[in-house]
């Protein structure tokens, strides 16, 4: 009976998550930001700073970081759009050569390119079939769409921060003294581990990006800012992120 209920519940949960993904994704980001700002929140609460001032300070910090990130990504995208056409023809020729080699190999097994990739790569990689400018424009349009979730993330974050102080009171009403202390200790340990992981990962990613950008400048590599951003972001992807990042320069 339990197995049957589980089988029935899984598709329902998947359907609910897919339907409400526009809400769950901002909520996840808000929870992530609440862990990031937890030390500041805790420090200001100890100093008896009013919750409205804490929220306003967090909002200012988030807006500043968002503006700085947007300007940085925009500058990197502009440099890529203006500089990549110099390399596009050579890149397409190399990829077409790789396709021809693969076609020779696949011909031995009577295997067509479309059967492997599902579409015509030759058409995609033709000079008129691919445009980095168009790809980046689509990416920027997607980024603009995602940015509309910013307000929803802020609302969730403010709600989480406002309710943070009332958690202890609620635990007192439903748990015994021993269970309450154990629960608070467990939650505190989880929060510290997440913060330590984020801090360590951020420092390592930042150092990797800075060192990589310095080396690329020394060797005259183009798109230094783009590569630096990719180095920083890819290091946050577990396992394969560092491997991909090592091949970016």
Image (tube, rainbow, N blue to C red):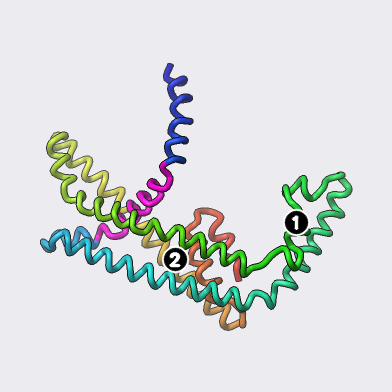
| Residue 89 vs residue 219, the one in the foreground | 89
Q: Residue at x 52, y 67 (%)?
A: 231
174 over 97 or under it: above or below: above
Tell me residue 89's x, y (percent): 74, 72
61 over 31 or under it: above or below: below
Tell me residue 77's x, y (percent): 54, 72
136 over 184 or under it: above or below: below
Tell me residue 87's x, y (percent): 69, 75
Which numbered mark, 1 or 2, is in the foreground of this view? 1
Taking the image as shown, residue 79 lies to the left or right of residue 101, namely left
7 over 194 or under it: above or below: above
Provide the secondary structure element on which disc 1 rests: helix
Q: In the displayed image of the protein, which residue is found farthest to the top?
A: 1
In the picture of the structure, the residue carrying the numbered disc 1 is 121
Provide the secondary structure element on which disc 2 rests: helix
The stretch drawn in magenta includes residue 30: yes
Crowd rating for badge 2 (residues with CA inside 10 Å; few <14, some 14–19, many 20+): some
Indicate the quadrant containing the C terminus: top left, top right, bottom left or bottom right.
Answer: bottom right
Indicate the quadrant containing the N terminus: top left, top right, bottom left or bottom right.
Answer: top left
Q: Residue at x 60, y 67 (%)?
A: 248
Q: Residue at x 79, y 61 (%)?
A: 98
Taking the image as shown, residue 53 lies to the left or right of residue 151, namely left
Does the image show residue 212? no
Q: Which mark is residue 204?
A: 2
Most frequent secondary structure within the magenta stretch: helix
Highlighted magenta segment, given as a residue range: 20-39
């Amino acid at each position: 009976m339990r197995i049957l209920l589980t089988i029935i519940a899984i598709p329902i949960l998947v359907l609910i998550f897919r339907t409400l993904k526009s809400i769950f994704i901002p909520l996840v980001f808000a929870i992530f930001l609440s862990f990031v700002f937890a030390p500041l929140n805790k420090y200001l609460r100890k100093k008896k700073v009013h919750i409205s001032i804490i929220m306003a300070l967090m909002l200012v910090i988030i807006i500043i970081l968002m503006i700085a990130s947007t300007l940085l990504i925009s500058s990197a995208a502009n440099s890529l759009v203006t500089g990549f056409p110099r390399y596009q023809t050579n890149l397409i020729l190399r990829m077409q050569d790789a396709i021809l080699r693969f076609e020779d190999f696949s011909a031995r097994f009577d295997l067509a390119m479309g059967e492997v990739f599902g579409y015509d790569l030759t058409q995609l990689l033709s000079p008129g079939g691919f445009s980095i400018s168009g790809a980046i424009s689509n990416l920027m349009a997607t980024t603009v769409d995602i940015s509309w979730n910013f307000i929803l993330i802020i609302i969730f974050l403010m709600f989480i921060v406002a309710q943070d102080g009332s958690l202890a009171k609620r635990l007192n009403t439903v748990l015994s003294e021993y269970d309450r202390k154990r629960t608070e200790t467990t939650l505190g340990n989880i929060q510290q581990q997440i913060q330590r992981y984020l801090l360590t990962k951020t420092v390592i990613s930042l150092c990797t990006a800075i060192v990589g950008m310095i080396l690329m400048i020394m060797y005259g590599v183009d798109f230094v800012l783009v590569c630096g951003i990719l180095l920083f972001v890819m290091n946050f992807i577990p396992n394969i992120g560092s491997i991909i990042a090592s091949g970016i320069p």
